[in-house]
Image: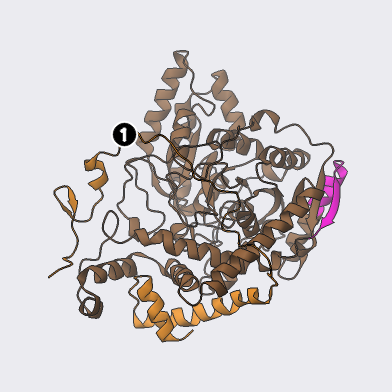
């Protein structure tokens, strides 16, 4: 049961061949068996999930509508507020926090009949590319338990790859859905900025953050995206435009299809095995009748530097809210030199934040504060915003000449746990192919396109213009139908 | 970056750092700031800064009272509570 795709399970549920209770029980059992190895979840709501499943079954048996995901279990990244459930964002700062409301995507999941299994592990405040920055535990890659699953949505990606959930939600600020999807051998999509509501998504960088789906295959992404997309009066940056029927059109091939390949994506730092798999995928598109041609994104070598100024500047402002007053951690003892100099209230803020935040979060708050500080703002933050415009202009030009831009999702396959833990800059460079999409507001997807000799998954990234998710999914599905990478499962 | 600069930025960010953290932070931030300094070489003459990928507009709704989060729910996660208020260390002593 747990090896079946989301669409397959959904069809069986709709026909009445399976009950939601049976499906949910199977995934909860997989969680019990595999979690000691994988550690994808921070919190599993076993009783709540079974209650939801039985309620859906009762409604379906009574002939009531149960919604487009009726009875299908889903895992949720711990960055999303779920009313009354632990929501830590991977941080000690929010240990014990229970949100008083549901994020809009959670409201939509409930209306769609999805069964919430629990909350998945992540890099603290979504800052990281390996899930090692979680304050609670390191999640393992199901394909090799000594390696990282990617990040920051590593728990969600690992849960789907391990057969612990057929679907999962993540968030992507610089690649945090696509990179772990690639490293765990599954599909993951970052929607265009504004496609999905951010209400109840704990903020990292507000001009870059988007919530998006994980699934074993592209069809699963289409089903989940269709449910979570759309305008939300509670998020003024969500865009009011119709949501296409992604799940209905995903199997329609695109003819003609022009695939653009940025020459800048095949330079130094790209692992030869990853390059070979991606080049083979591009050849497959040609076999499918697509035109594959070179495009150029000349500003892309500066994307990582741009991102680490824009994202950290926004984060330094967003994370100012963790001051120990309204919720979360508060320092017990506030005596010391800061109290003597600035008073006990300021000392409480400083010590609360010093105790509550982990190393990477502190580094990013510091970098962002510096980039915005008096005397440095023009040289760093404002300069980064200008280069951001150049990066967006590059994509505008590319999409005038092609339908999708294709390349590797990540420069290497999954690396060993601990390898980059003390070298933040090396860790940042693992996002080199994914962060431009967030800066430019476009959509992107990662799908499996091969394995290394060592048996580690490799991801192909496709990107499309803002609000072209339908085209993106159809282009991805064309490749998926012609290959069988997405049918491989990790042996656990 | 100098340790004095890092100490000042930590104060702006309201972060208490230990001496060991300050030393590590100085070394790591210096490496990161050196890396991002590559942007200075990019010609951005006449380029408008882009703060948001999409044009963002103010969104208005009628100013009508609606139910909001009950006080008890809003205060449920408070680390320190005095009646219907949050408790904090005294500002005036």
The residue lying at 47 percent from left, 51 percent from top is: A40
Disc 1 crowd rating (10 Å Cα; few below 14, some 14-19, many 20+) is few
In the picture, residue A305 is in which quadrant? bottom right
| Segment tinted magenta in the rendering | A280-296
Q: Quadrant of the N terminus of chain A?
A: top right
User: In the image, residue B74 lies at what x, y percent?
Assistant: 26, 45
* Visual hue assigned to chain A: brown
* Visual hue assigned to chain B: orange
Asked if the stretch drawn in magenta spans residue A207, the answer is no
Give the left or right position of residue A468, taking residue A369 as reference: right
Q: Chain of mark 1?
A: B
Q: A451 or A249: nearer the eye?
A: A249
> Mark 1 highlights which residue?
B65
Q: In this picture, is A353 found above or below A337? A: above
Asked if the stretch drawn in magenta spans residue A284, the answer is yes
Can residue B76 be seen by looking at this rendering? Answer: no
Q: A234 or B47: nearer the eye?
A: B47
Q: Secondary structure at mark 1?
A: loop
The residue lying at 40 percent from left, 24 percent from top is: A55
User: In the image, residue A344 lies at what x, y percent?
Assistant: 20, 71
Give the left or right position of residue A333, taking residue A248 as reference: left
The residue lying at 58 percent from left, 24 percent from top is: A12
Give the left or right position of residue A424, taking residue A187 as reference: left
């Amino acid at each position: 049961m747990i090896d079946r795709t989301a669409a397959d399970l959904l069809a069986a549920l709709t026909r009445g061949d399976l009950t939601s209770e049976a499906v949910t029980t199977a995934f909860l059992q997989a969680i019990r068996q595999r979690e000691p190895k994988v550690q994808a979840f921070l919190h599993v709501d076993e009783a709540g999930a079974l209650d939801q499943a039985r309620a859906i079954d009762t409604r379906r048996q009574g002939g009531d509508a149960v919604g487009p995901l009726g009875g299908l279990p889903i895992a949720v990244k711990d960055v999303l507020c779920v009313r009354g459930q632990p929501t830590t964002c991977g941080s000690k700062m929010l240990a014990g926090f229970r949100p008083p409301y549901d994020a809009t995507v959670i409201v939509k999941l409930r209306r769609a009949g999805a069964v919430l299994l629990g909350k998945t592990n992540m890099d603290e405040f979504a800052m990281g590319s390996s899930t090692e920055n979680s304050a609670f535990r390191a999640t393992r890659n199901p394909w090799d338990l000594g390696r990282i699953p990617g990040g920051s949505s590593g728990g969600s990606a690992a849960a789907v790859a391990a057969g612990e959930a057929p679907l999962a939600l993540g968030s992507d600020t610089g690649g945090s859905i696509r990179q772990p999807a690639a490293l765990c051998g599954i599909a993951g999509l970052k929607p265009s900025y504004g496609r999905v509501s951010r209400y109840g998504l704990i903020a990292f960088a507000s001009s870059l953050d988007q919530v998006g789906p994980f699934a074993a295959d592209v069809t699963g992404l289409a089903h989940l995206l269709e449910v979570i997309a759309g305008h939300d009066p509670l998020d003024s940056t969500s865009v009011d435009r119709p949501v296409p029927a992604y799940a209905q059109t995903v199997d329609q091939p695109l003819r003609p299809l022009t695939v653009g390949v940025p020459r800048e994506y095949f330079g130094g730092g790209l692992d030869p095995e990853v390059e070979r798999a991606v080049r083979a995928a591009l050849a497959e598109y040609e076999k499918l009748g697509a035109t594959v041609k070179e495009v150029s994104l000349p500003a892309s070598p500066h994307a990582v530097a741009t991102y680490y100024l824009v994202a950290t500047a926004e984060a330094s402002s967003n994370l100012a809210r963790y001051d120990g007053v309204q919720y979360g951690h508060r320092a017990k003892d506030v005596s010391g030199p800061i109290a003597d100099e600035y008073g006990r209230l300021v000392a409480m803020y400083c010590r609360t934040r010093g105790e509550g935040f982990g190393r990477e979060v502190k580094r990013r708050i510091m970098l962002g504060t510096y980039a915005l500080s008096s005397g440095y703002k023009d040289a760093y933050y404002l300069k980064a915003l200008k280069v951001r415009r150049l990066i967006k202009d590059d994509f505008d030009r590319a999409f005038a000449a092609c339908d999708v831009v294709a390349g590797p999702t990540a420069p290497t396959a999954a690396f060993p746990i601990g390898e980059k833990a003390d070298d933040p800059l090396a860790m940042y460079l693992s996002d080199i192919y994914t962060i431009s999409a967030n800066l430019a507001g476009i959509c992107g997807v990662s799908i499996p396109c091969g394995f290394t000799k060592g048996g580690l998954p490799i991801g192909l990234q496709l990107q499309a213009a803002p609000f072209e998710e339908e085209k993106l999914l159809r282009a991805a599905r064309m490749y998926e139908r012609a290959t069988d990478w997405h049918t491989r499962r990790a042996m656990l | 970056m100098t340790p004095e600069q890092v100490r000042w930025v930590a104060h702006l960010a309201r972060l208490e750092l230990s001496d060991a953290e300050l030393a590590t932070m100085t070394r790591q931030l210096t490496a990161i700031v050196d890396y991002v300094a590559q942007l200075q070489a990019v010609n951005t003459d006449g380029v408008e800064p882009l703060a948001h990928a999409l044009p963002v507009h103010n969104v208005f709704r009628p100013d009508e009272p609606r139910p909001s989060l009950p006080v008890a729910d809003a205060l449920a996660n408070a680390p320190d509570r005095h009646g219907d208020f949050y408790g904090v260390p005294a500002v005036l002593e």
